[in-house]
Amino acid sequence: MGRAPCCSKVGLHKGPWTPKEDALLTKYIQAHGEGQWKSLPKKAGLLRCGKSCRLRWMNYLRPDIKRGNITPEEDDLIIRMHSLLGNRWSLIAGRLPGRTDNEIKNYWNTHLIKKLKNQVPDHDTNTPHNKLPTTPPPQEQPQSGNKKKKSNNSGKKKSKQQKNKGTTNAKEQPPKTQVYLPKPIRVKALYLPRSDSNTSNSASASTSQEKEETPTTKAASNMVCELGDDVGFFGIFGEDHDLVNKSDMECQSYFPTDHSTLERLYEEYFQLLNMDHDDDDSPLEQLDSFAESLLE
DNA sequence: AAAAGCACCAACCGCTGTGTC
DNA sequence: AGACACAGCGGTTGGTGCTTT
């Protein structure tokens, strides 16, 4: 659509927020509430774009933000949710009151990838316990954020260049055997309201299609296979997932469409996912209730 | 002690979905 | 129906501090 970047205006501040800016933003939102991000900076006396204000508020200034280390319970939940949902950080954050998508994303990228990688040294073993479903190991992603600067500046914008070029740097890429990263469907409006936020997140905007599906079929319909060397691991995708290589076609054709098959796969997937579940509810019930919550 | 490398994470960027006109 | 604005999301960058050499 060609909309200019919101921060392109000359004179707007970028970079780290100062305490003064934080105070201005907080004060304004406390007085007038969230929303109207576009006009908020001007009204609040901030030289920031609305987007930047929104991000700052959502990630750091909201009163319900929980600071501090991720607990082991949260850690475990993130891993499980990620194996279920992929990189849908906002959904995962919705299950962790007080945590933000950005925080979880950072935590995943800095801690959990390494942790899981250590747990699963042989990345080709397609065991059910391989809970590293989507993100390639860092060395397969040399453009990713961890390897950077100080060594040289030529790496800057590299990933964007690659992106723009469309895909390929064939000579450095290891053969791809996995299909992952779901292009997430935007299940907005979440169903999983943050603990005390009364923000726009609470709106529910699920599509009519989503509403017609049962939780189970909804969850199952989001499944997609991740092709290991020979086996399918079932990860969750959005319906319009991106297909990243030719093996995707196999995956797509493998993708079942009738509900009984989907439900069977769903159950299979869930069993793989919850080998060590707790006793209270059956895992299926837990996931069903979670899936139901997605549709509320 | 200094330099280089690494890890962390706040913030930005670009894209997409939705609502409104 | 199409264009546009807004809100939200995930990917990525880059500054900073810590660790290692």
Image (cartoon, coloured by chain):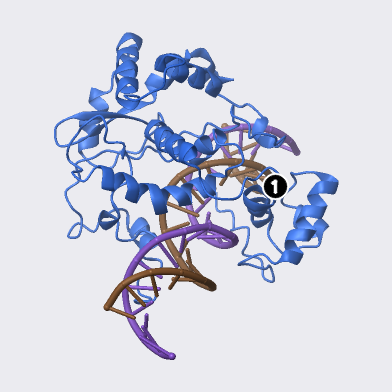
Chain colours: A blue, B purple, C brown
Give the vertical position of A20 relative to C10 (above or below): below
Residue where numbered disc 1 is placed: A62
Give the vertical position of A148 relative to A188 (above or below): below
Q: Position of residue A115 (x, y in %)?
A: 34, 47
* Side of C17 relative to A171 (left or right): right
Q: Name the residue at the top extreme.
A: A260
Q: Quadrant of residue A199?
A: top right
Residue drawn at (50%, 22%) of the image: A290
Q: Name the residue at the left extreme.
A: A230
Residue drawn at (61%, 41%) of the image: A98
Residue A229, visible in the rendered structure: yes
Q: Nearer the viewer, residue A209 or A179?
A: A179
Q: Quadrant of residue A216?
A: top left
Q: Secondary structure at mark 1?
A: loop
Q: Position of residue A194 (x, y in %)?
A: 63, 35
Q: Amino acid at mark 1?
A: Arg
Q: Give me the chain letter of mark 1.
A: A
Q: Nearer the viewer, residue A79 or A184?
A: A79
Q: Position of residue A226 (x, y in %)?
A: 26, 33
Q: Nearer the viewer, residue A142 or A283?
A: A283
Q: Position of residue A141 (x, y in %)?
A: 29, 56
* Side of A84 relative to A261 (left or right): right
Q: Quadrant of the C terminus of chain A?
A: top right
